[in-house]
Image (cartoon, rainbow, N blue to C red):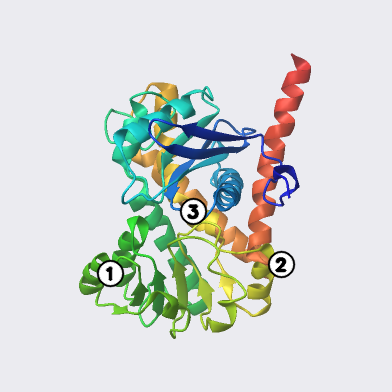
Amino acid sequence: MTLFDSPSFANHEGVHAVFDEKTGLRAIIAVHSTARGPAVGGTRMWNYASSAEALEDVLRLSRGMSYKNAVADLEMGGGKSVIIGDSRTQKTPELFRAFGRAVDTLGGIYYAAEDVGVSVSDIAEARKVTPYVLGLNDGPEASGDPSPVTAEGVFRSTLTVARRLWKQDDLTGLTVSVQGIGHVGGYLADKLYAAGAKLIMTDVNTALLAEVAARTNAEIVAPDAIYDVKADIYAPCALGATLNPQTLDRLTVKAVVGAANNQLATPDIGQILFERGVLYAPDYVVNGGGIINVASELTARQTGGAYDPAWVETKLSRLMDTLAEVLERSEAEKRPTHQIADSIAEARINAARDLKAEQRKAA
């Protein structure tokens, strides 16, 4: 199968393979859409089994960013990048400067930020050679680590679901199974625990897992056992596609609300969840807080201003209104939530694309 034949290609505007012999950099930068503005999306460093696996991941993530940015009503398109390698052993400052130079060659159609396996300090290295990175700690416009804002959005989404399903404003009496307690999952666990939830959690990082579990009074289970625990809400906060044919029959939850990207292995999984009465809060709506925080930095640069937490809060609140709309429409229209969210995102992207076409004609 060629790139253009892949279902994940999804009309990408550009896919760029990057190699730097000196540093060993192997990366792919995918730009799905610039209809609403420059493509913005994080950089993931992962030890992929093959370049084909890396390509599939970056294409799905890139398209997801177009939808996520549109649903959050940000003036940004969608893109993503992946670096093939082990983030624990193969990171060097030179590697990220080489990556920064690759981003720079795109001339601003894509802005990179941190994601799985990549830290704010890594992005700071790329910033030494290109202005087209976001999520920095230094400077008046710097937005810093987006993880706390991502976690806040996931937490508020969980409360939205709890109000809808259990008619309560906190999580008292509810059990949440948290898969992954890294950048976002750890912050989320603290918030869930403070709201009264009982937590069951897992992670491959056993030391960090023990630390988070100790402060949240959580039960620890093995990574694969998280699908079998008795819980009310499943919160996937690690890698994507954990909702798949192998896991669906093992889950006993009433809702899925998590931070991971691309939680549905295939779109039909969303239909199956809907038919089974499991409320799926669409991932790119739920986890949009982080990109909102990053967008504030881009907005500040464009206007010559500074990072504005009030702007972030306004956008995050509106995103929660959109989630409520998705859940209400799903019930009223008897359609899966992911289809409702997709329709909202696609309408906004298409409107922006049509407007650009009209402007080109007028010029």
In three-dimensional space, the C-alpha distance between marks 3 and 2, rounded to whole angstroms, equals 35 Å
Q: Secondary structure at mark 2?
A: loop
Q: Amino acid at mark 3?
A: Tyr
Q: Nearer the viewer, residue 100 or 151?
A: 100
Please, which residue is most extreme toward the bottom here? 230
Q: Quadrant of residue 302?
A: top left
Residue density around tag 3, few if under 14, some if 14–19, many if 20 or more, within 10 Å: some
Q: Amino acid at mark 1?
A: Thr
Residue 206 tag number: 1
Of circles 3 and 2, the one toward us is 3
Q: Secondary structure at mark 3?
A: loop
In three-dimensional space, the C-alpha distance between marks 2 and 1, rounded to whole angstroms, equals 39 Å
Residue 335 tag number: 2
Answer yes or no: do the residues labelled 3 and 1 have beta carbons within 8 Å?
Answer: no
- Position of residue 34 relative to residue 290, above or below, is above
Answer yes or no: do the residues labelled 2 and 1 have beta carbons within 8 Å?
Answer: no
Of callouts 3 and 1, the N-terminal one: 3
Of circles 2 and 1, the one toward us is 1
The residue located at (77%, 16%) in the rendering is: 362
Of callouts 3 and 2, the N-terminal one: 3
Quarter of the C terminus within the rendering: top right
In three-dimensional space, the C-alpha distance between marks 3 and 1, rounded to whole angstroms, equals 22 Å
Instruction: Say whether residue 85 is left or right of residue 91.
Output: right
Q: Amino acid at mark 2?
A: Arg
The residue located at (47%, 73%) in the rendering is: 234
Instruction: Say whether residue 207 is left or right of residue 279.
Output: left
Relative image position of residue 30 (x, y in whole percent): 58, 39
